[in-house]
Amino acid sequence: MNIIIKTALVLSMLTGTLAILLTFSKKWFGNGHKTELTINNRLILNVETECTLLRVLHDNDIQIPASCNSKGTCCECKVKITSSPPPMNAQEQGCLSEKEINDGIRLSCQVYVSNPMSIGLSEDLIINWKPCSIKSIENYSDDLAEISIQTKSTIDYIPGAYIQLQFIEDDDLKEKTITKFYIYNFDANADVLGFLLDIKENEQVMEKLQQFKNKKLFMSDVSEPSELADLTICDEKSIGLFLSLVYAGKNTLLVTKKTYQLPKEIDPKRIIVYKDDSELAAALEQLIKTDQVTDSMDLFITGQEATVKTIRKHLLIRKYDHKKIHYEYLER
Amino acid sequence: MIEINPLVILFAAMLTNNMLLSNFLGMCSFIVISKDVPTALGLGQAVTFVMTCTTVINFLLYYYVLVPLELEYIRYIVFIITIAAFVQLVEMFIKKYFKGLYSSLGIFLPLITVNCAILGASLFMIIRQYGLIQSLLFGLGSGIGWTMALVILSSINIKLEKAPIPKHLKGAGMTFIITGIMALAFMGFSGLVSI
């Protein structure tokens, strides 16, 4: 009996002492200093140093997929580290291909944030969704609809900027659509922002907007103007961008198959109406001849895939530098 | 207590009675970590530190707590608890001050707890009836010996990367063969000191 009590006493005293020691030393060693984590060169987080990158991102509501509870076996939490990537451990070597390793991709659950670090993430992951609602949908002209979005806060708006709207169809299934809209403000109120859409070209989007007229949606932050181009070429899909850039005094062109009733003050030279690809090519040729499009310009083409491809192809044939032609497909 | 010069024990633990090469204790991390020298050196240092400190702590616990209370039979539990707590401390320390080492050691740092060489050192010290200074130097010597073996093996492994080894021998198989040869080589020290 005596020996049992003695054993219990000795063991509990030993474990107790060690537990207290560990708790205190955790306080001593554990509280790391803070450091900066830069995401996509714009979002800067102030983070604790002793955490893994994955933990830090999850704590900041950036949901990197991961399923193995930081063991480094599911190989899902890959993140591109744009500052000097840390050395790898065995788990990472097993998960990553040679190309990924050279590109600076690491498993975020194995990387500790120590010094200031910068990483690149897909934009979808770092959007800070805020609730908003549709204030009105009105006809701007026969072809165009103007949509106003009521936001909760004041919006700083720069011509050429865009927001993304998230339509959540079903909360349980997490079924959602994300659509990008270029801002074209026509309301003086700073907490209302609007955009113009071609009704026929954007049938599905218009339908969705009608459907969500009285429901809550979520909007992203207002972006920086997507491209600081010398010339922006828009088409029917991006007519809102065209108008906002025209009023902001930026160099822009509208390439369209149909004639819009646009305000008279817009220089008709900025609008190119064409019927088929050959006419578009001829019009582009004319622009090149009159030096409206030169090869020293940074170009940004945005709109339907077919139009963008035709314009880009033509410019490439004319030996324009492909690095100077930026483009985006608004809908595939 | 046994009468041996503590320095003899230190050198014997490093060379003739090398924990790894004469008793083959602590093989698991030895095989996996032996791929590059800085990491091997880091793990070696951690093991040496843990081994030295735990032999001393365990010595004090054994002779001043367990023996007077006639509780020698729970020494395994006591030793392991001490080692586990100590490894936690070392882990926190390395995590805070040596981030690179921490991530390259990965899972093997907390696994020092179950490194048999460390428990082995504590148990040998009891079996061989060492005194306090002898135990301290025995722990230190064993740790240095283990580190030495690990560093030598990892340097050999770097050379082996470019050597024409049969495909199926690569990795652990070759490591065992090399360890065997190293053990034979270390037997050459046997005339030097003995314990």
Image: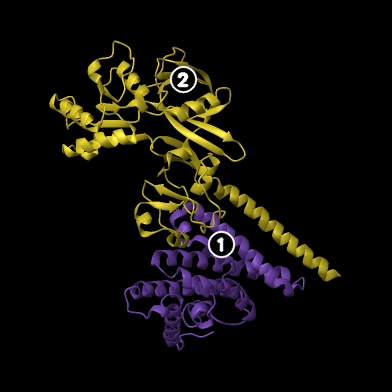
Chain colours: A yellow, B purple
Decide if residue B26 is on the left or right side of residue B73. left
Q: Which of the image's four quarters has the C terminus of chain A?
A: top left
Q: Quadrant of residue A94?
A: bottom left
Does residue A331 show up? yes
User: On the image, numbered disc 1 is attached to which residue?
Assistant: B110
Q: Where's residue A59, x and y in %?
A: 55, 41
Q: Where's residue A45, x and y in %?
A: 47, 37
Viewer-closest of A283 and B62: A283
Q: Secondary structure at mark 1?
A: helix
Q: Secondary structure at mark 2?
A: strand
- Mark 1 vs 2: CB contact within 8 A: no
**Residue sitting at 57 percent across and 57 percent down?**
B89
Q: Which of the image's four quarters has the N terminus of chain A?
A: bottom right
Viewer-closest of B40 and A146: A146
The circle drawn on residue A328 is none
Decide if residue A307 is on the left or right side of residue A187. left
User: On the image, numbered disc 2 is attached to which residue?
Assistant: A147
Q: Up-down: is B12 above or below A302? A: below
Q: CA distance from mark 1 to mark 2?
A: 59 Å
Q: Where's residue A70, x and y in %?
A: 54, 54
Inspect the image, locate mark 2, and give the three-letter code of the amino acid beneath it: Ile
Chain under label 2? A
Viewer-closest of A183 and A238: A238
Q: Where's residue A257, x and y in %?
A: 30, 25
**Residue sitting at 44 percent across and 15 percent down?**
A139
Does residue A32 show up? no
Q: Same chain for marks 1 and 2? A: no
From the image, state whether disc 1 or disc 2 is nearer to you: 2
- Residue lying farthest top? A264
Mark 2 burial class by Cα count in 10 Å: few <14, some 14-19, many 20+ = many
